[in-house]
Image (tube, rainbow, N blue to C red):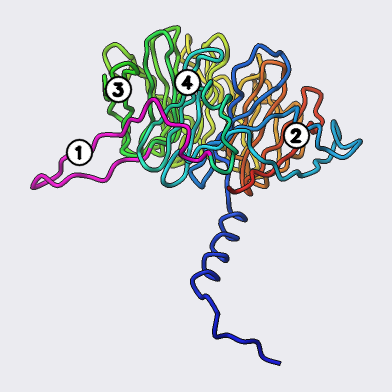
Amino acid sequence: MCGDARNWDEEAYRETILKEREIQTRTVFRTVWAPTLNPNPDTIVVASSDGSVSSYSIPSLISKLPLGFSNVKAPYLLMAEPNCFLQAHEGPAYDVKFYGNGEDSMLLSCGDDGRIRGWNWKDCTHSEVPFHLQGNQVKPVLDLVNPQHKGPWGALSPIPENNALAVNNQGGSIFSAAGDSCVYCWDVERGQVKMIFKGHSDYLHSIVARNSTNQIITGSEDGTARIWDCKSGKCVQVIEPAKNTKLKGSCVSCVALDASESWLACGSGQNLSVWNLPASECISRTSTRAFVQDVVFDENQILAVGAEPLLSRFDINGVILSQMQCAPQSAFSVSLQSSGVTAIGGYGGVVDVISQFGSHLCTFGCRCV
């Protein structure tokens, strides 16, 4: 028996299919732990490919797990509702950072639309609006847009995307790694560009602030990491992780500093390298099975994730100390909380929260709003 197709809504059907595809391919590009006085992991903030920035309560998620599924070796996937939901960008949101300290800090995000937006964290945590209505209800207190460049005959270039952020709280600065191969240094109070760092030959993937020496370090598609002096705006050192190896042409996808800001880790293709910055010397180079997509220091060890469902731990000499399965099939972000709890975000909109003892505290999928 045939159905009645007279009321068929082709447009609604198309929207449903596109929404399902968006959910299946949703990606978490960055996670960051929110500032808290609580020594235990409390709130994590997630930047996603749908342009949203959302916060999730870890204790609340753990309380919803079936009995016996917390602190287990295999993850149990929850579909999680955010505490706060911000429709931050048109296009993917690539990075989130906190500027300042405590409840008075500002939540920053950047994305494919070339914007840097900032919200008072207190406004996000104290909003009484239901999360599914919050998208544009919590207003940003900062809204910056990358400048456009004039080409021949006065034509303006497209607005370059922002792929990563770094902050200098004492200097009142935000640094954005952009798609036009430049770093833009923004004055937070004035909302204006203070300085532009030029020297890379291709777009930027990553950036970290080395505030103890008033420097920044960038990683680029051109295969180099560069150290920049923030006073002069000049490049003071070029690091080539793939130099004298068979990995020439590999981009520098991620960079990280240790707490002393003396050691630098670089992910470059299927390669992890560690550098002693005071000595300007490469200490180790390690080949990895998959493309390295994010790294972070845990004291004198390095945590790395990439295009495989694994969290790898290395020592400073590049020796693998441990590897454990994580939920995202391809991971783009690893962030470490002061207690030693780790969050891994990636493909499928999945975040895996792993305890300092190597068990899965909770694993959740970010629900589309």
Q: Is 23 left or right of 182, judged from the image as shown?
A: right
Disc marking residue 106: 4
The answer to the question of whether label 3 and label 2 lie on touching residues, with beta carbons closer than 8 A, is no
Instruction: Write down the region rendered in magenta.
Output: 134-161
Instruction: Identify the residue at the far bottom of this view.
Output: 1
- Residue corresponding to mark 3: 191
From the image, give the main secondary structure of the stretch colored magenta.
Answer: loop
Is residue 137 covered in magenta?
yes
Disc 3 or 1, which lies upstream in sequence? 1
Specify the quadrant of the image occupied by residue 181. Answer: top left
Which one is nearer the viewer's eye here, 74 or 269?
A: 74
Q: Is residue 271 visible?
A: no
Which one is nearer the viewer's eye here, 146 or 128?
A: 128
**Quarter of the image containing the N terminus?**
bottom right
- Name the amino acid, label 3: Gly
Count residues near mark 1 (Cα–Cα under 10 Å), then give few for <14, some for 14-19, many for 20+: few
The answer to the question of whether label 2 and label 4 lie on touching residues, with beta carbons closer than 8 A, is no
Q: How far apart are marks 3 and 4 (CA)?
A: 14 Å
At horizontal 18% and vertical 44% (from top left) the residue drawn is 156
Disc 2 or 4, which lies upstream in sequence? 2
Q: Is 84 left or right of 183, judged from the image as shown?
A: right
Q: Distance between the residues labelled 3 and 1?
A: 19 Å
- On the image, the x and y values in percent for residue 218 come to 41, 26
Specify the quadrant of the image occupied by residue 21. Answer: bottom right
- On the image, the x and y values in percent for residue 87 come to 48, 41
Count residues near mark 2 (Cα–Cα under 10 Å), then give few for <14, some for 14-19, many for 20+: some
Count residues near mark 4 (Cα–Cα under 10 Å), then give few for <14, some for 14-19, many for 20+: many
Disc marking residue 61: 2
The answer to the question of whether label 1 and label 4 lie on touching residues, with beta carbons closer than 8 A, is no
